[in-house]
Structures are given as structure tokens and as C-alpha cells.
């Protein structure tokens, strides 16, 4: 078995009564290391107490273990009621790219409490797509250079879909930006998952923007970039511990053997576990290896009992001195840390090479996009 070491003093962050915006939860941490400081962006809320407010908090550390939070949220919901993230922001992944930090985060158009109390709305132009009418989560990008100012770049997933687990690869591949995501046409914890389990898709773009169209119809002669871009099914659930849905965890790690990629999976009982796969370095649509068993599952008391029992949810897996620091949320309340050796993870997953890989079609022609990465 792959040896994973949980930090003995987990959780490393949790609900804080001294932070009005984070008194009920501090979970699902996106983390990067700049060579001297660890930067964490986590989901915080007053949701359990009934306020319904959900924001992204920021904390930093010099050792990756002891984090100090700023007194104010890092990113609040947008004040603009026409924005997809006017209601909530949560669950980010962070990618360093050309000296800037790109933060992929999920948002909702309505505050959770308001939606639960029956408030409904239409989107811009009286859109009736489910991002607005059903409060589906949609994913956007934000960018920061100094961890003080953060700029929104807009949504990168479609207003037709409930999408999540978006992460940007840390380098271009064949001249394209690459992104993982999990689109579903329904809320991803409901009965339809039995018939259509959540899968991981991989998207390529010349410049980063929406990975699926907001157009309502899909005529075959649509050639102006509003149709579905260069998006491909990467993996689908194959094992019982993945039965309901799978989704990407931290940003894929570049190695000489390929892209080492962690993902989470959910079984029929709602238990969250962690999986591991290796993608081809030059064509990450190709899965080189994939473990048939989870590499980590809920075991400790802080992973078994809480707001969402038996849930571990990694959002970061950064490499420091050949050691992987895996930061994960636990039971929708805490931020936790586990570590493992990079070479051990590679040796383990390479035992499970995929023999008959189906080669997907070549990259499609360039599309016309509207949102530049370089800001």
C-alpha cells in the first residue's frame, strides 16, 4: 500500500468564532507554495448558523502547517446581481502560471439561505438556464499577484450545467491551456447520478474561457466558437468506490513519467475517497495508469463525524523537496494535511498501467474565445 502520513495535529484549520465570516466552517483548501510562503484559500461560511453566507478566506504559513488567517475574506460573492457568483463562492484550486496565481472557484447566483426559502430569479436577458433558476454551481477564474488584490476573470463553465472541480494545468500543452472539470446537467448529489455518474472531462483552449457553450441550440453549422470547444471525456467511474461521481482534486503534478493526478470519488453511500492516476505528459487525454483501489479513505474521527460524515476532499497536492503536501477538506468543516513521497506515489500508480487506452480524436481546430488569460 502507498504510505500516506496524516499530520498528527490535524485539523490545521477549522471554524473560528473570532471570524464572523468563518465561524461555522473552514474547509476545502486550495494551496500553493512560492518558495518561501504557503498560500491557502479556503471555503468559509456562516451557513450552519443559518446566515447562508459563503466566502473564500485567505491564510499563509512559513512551514505549511501553522496558518494565520487574514481578518477579512479574500473573495466575497460579487455585488453585481447579474453575476453567476452573486450568491456564494467556494471550493477553489490554485495554479501558478507565469508568476500569477489563477484561482478556479465555484459560485452560485443566489445565497443558499435565500434559495432554500424559495427565492428564485432569472439571469441576464431573462435567461432561464439552471445557473439562475436552479442555483446550479458554475465555475469562474480569478487572479492575484500579491495575495492582496484579486481580480475576477469571469465564468469558465456553461450556465446550462452544474460544474465543479475545475483546475488549470500549470503549463501549456501543445500550445494550449488545459483544464479539468466535471459537468453534469443536474445537481451532483441527486438520483440522476445513479443513471449518469459524474465524470472528469478535459478541455483545451488557445485562450482560457468557457469550456462549454451558453447557446441554447447546437446547430451543426455553428462555427463561431459558441459551440462545445475542445472538450473530451477523460475518465468515468469504474469501481464501486467511485459509483456515483468522480472529480479532480489538486492541480496535476508534472513528472518525467506523466501528469500525476489525484481525484476524489464517491460511492453509493456517499463516502468520499481519494484516487490516483497518471496522464500522458504530451497528451493528457491518454490515461497511462490508474489505481483500482483508493489510496486514502476516511479513518480518523475528524474525517468520520461532522457536517458531512465520511468525507475527505483534497483540493491541493503541491510538491516540496520531493514530498507531496496533500491539503484536504474533512466532513465539510476542516482543513487537513497529509504527506507522501512523490516517488512512492509514482511507483505505486505505475503498477496499474492501462493496457488498452482508447485514443480520442486529434485536437480540434482553434476556436474563437473572448477571455484572455494575460491580464
Image: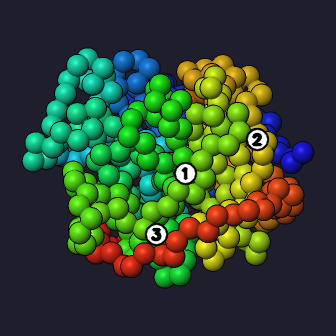
- Tag shown at residue 7: none
Q: Which residue is mark 2?
A: 294
Which mark is in front, 1 or 2?
A: 1
Cβ–Cβ under 8 Å for marks 1 and 2: no
- Tag shown at residue 204: 3
Q: Which x, y percent locates residue 32?
A: 59, 59
Q: Residue furthest bottom?
A: 175
> Is 310 located above or below residue 224 in the figure?
above
Q: Quadrant of the C terminus?
A: bottom left
Q: Which x, y percent locates residue 222?
A: 23, 68
Helix, strand or loop for disc 3? strand
Of labels 1 and 2, earlier in sequence is: 1
Instruction: Report the residue at 76% width, 60% height from top.
Output: 354
Left or right, 287 with reference to 79: right
Q: Pick the residue in front: 105 or 101.
A: 105
Instruction: Report the residue at 52% width, 41% height from top.
Output: 198
- Tag shown at residue 200: 1
Q: Quadrant of residue 142?
A: bottom left
Instruction: Report the residue at 33% width, 27% height from top.
Output: 112
Helix, strand or loop for disc 1? strand
Q: Quadrant of the N terminus?
A: top right
Q: Residue furthest right?
A: 1
The CA distance from mark 3 to mark 1 is 14 Å
Q: For label 2, count other residues whose C-alpha is less than 10 Å away and answer few (under 14), some (14-19) or many (20+).
A: some
Cβ–Cβ under 8 Å for marks 3 and 1: no
Amino acid at each position: 500500500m502507498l504510505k500516506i502520513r496524516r499530520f498528527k495535529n490535524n485539523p490545521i484549520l477549522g471554524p473560528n468564532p473570532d471570524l464572523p465570516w468563518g465561524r461555522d466552517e473552514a474547509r476545502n483548501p486550495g494551496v500553493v507554495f512560492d518558495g518561501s510562503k504557503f498560500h491557502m484559500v479556503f471555503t468559509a461560511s456562516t451557513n450552519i448558523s443559518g446566515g447562508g453566507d459563503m466566502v473564500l478566506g485567505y491564510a499563509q504559513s512559513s512551514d505549511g502547517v501553522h496558518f494565520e488567517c487574514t481578518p477579512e475574506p479574500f473573495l466575497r460573492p460579487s455585488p453585481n446581481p447579474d453575476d453567476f457568483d452573486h450568491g456564494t463562492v467556494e471550493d477553489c484550486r490554485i495554479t501558478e502560471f507565469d508568476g500569477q496565481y489563477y484561482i478556479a472557484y465555484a459560485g452560485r447566483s443566489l445565497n443558499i439561505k435565500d434559495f432554500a426559502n424559495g427565492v428564485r430569479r432569472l439571469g441576464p436577458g431573462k435567461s432561464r438556464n439552471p445557473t439562475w433558476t436552479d442555483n446550479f454551481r458554475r465555475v469562474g477564474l480569478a487572479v492575484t499577484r500579491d495575495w492582496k488584490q484579486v481580480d475576477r476573470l469571469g465564468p469558465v463553465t456553461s450556465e446550462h450545467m452544474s460544474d465543479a472541480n475545475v483546475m488549470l494545468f500549470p503549463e501549456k500543452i501543445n500550445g494550449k491551456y488545459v483544464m479539468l472539470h466535471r459537468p453534469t446537467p443536474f445537481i451532483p448529489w441527486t438520483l440522476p447520478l445513479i443513471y449518469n455518474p459524474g465524470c472528469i472531462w478535459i478541455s483545451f483552449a488557445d485562450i482560457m474561457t468557457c469550456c462549454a457553450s451558453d447557446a441554447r441550440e447546437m446547430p451543426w453549422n455553428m462555427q463561431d466558437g459558441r459551440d462545445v470547444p475542445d472538450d473530451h471525456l477523460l475518465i468515468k467511474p469504474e469501481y464501486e468506490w467511485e459509483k456515483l461521481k468522480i472529480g479532480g482534486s489538486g492541480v496535476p503534478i508534472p513528472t518525467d513519467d506523466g501528469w500525476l493526478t489525484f481525484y476524489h470519488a464517491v460511492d453509493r453511500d456517499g463516502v468520499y475517497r481519494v484516487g490516483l492516476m497518471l496522464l500522458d505528459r504530451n497528451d493528457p487525454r491518454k490515461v497511462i495508469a490508474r489505481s483500482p483501489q483508493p489510496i486514502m479513505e476516511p479513518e480518523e474521527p475528524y474525517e468520520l463525524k461532522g457536517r458531512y460524515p465520511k468525507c475527505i476532499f483534497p483540493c491541493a497536492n503541491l510538491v516540496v523537496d520531493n514530498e507531496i503536501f496533500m491539503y484536504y477538506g474533512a466532513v465539510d468543516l476542516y482543513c487537513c494535511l497529509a504527506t507522501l513521497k512523490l516517488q512512492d506515489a509514482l511507483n505505486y500508480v505505475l503498477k496499474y498501467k492501462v493496457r488498452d487506452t482508447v485514443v480520442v480524436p486529434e485536437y480540434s481546430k482553434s476556436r474563437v474565445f473572448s477571455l484572455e488569460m494575460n491580464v
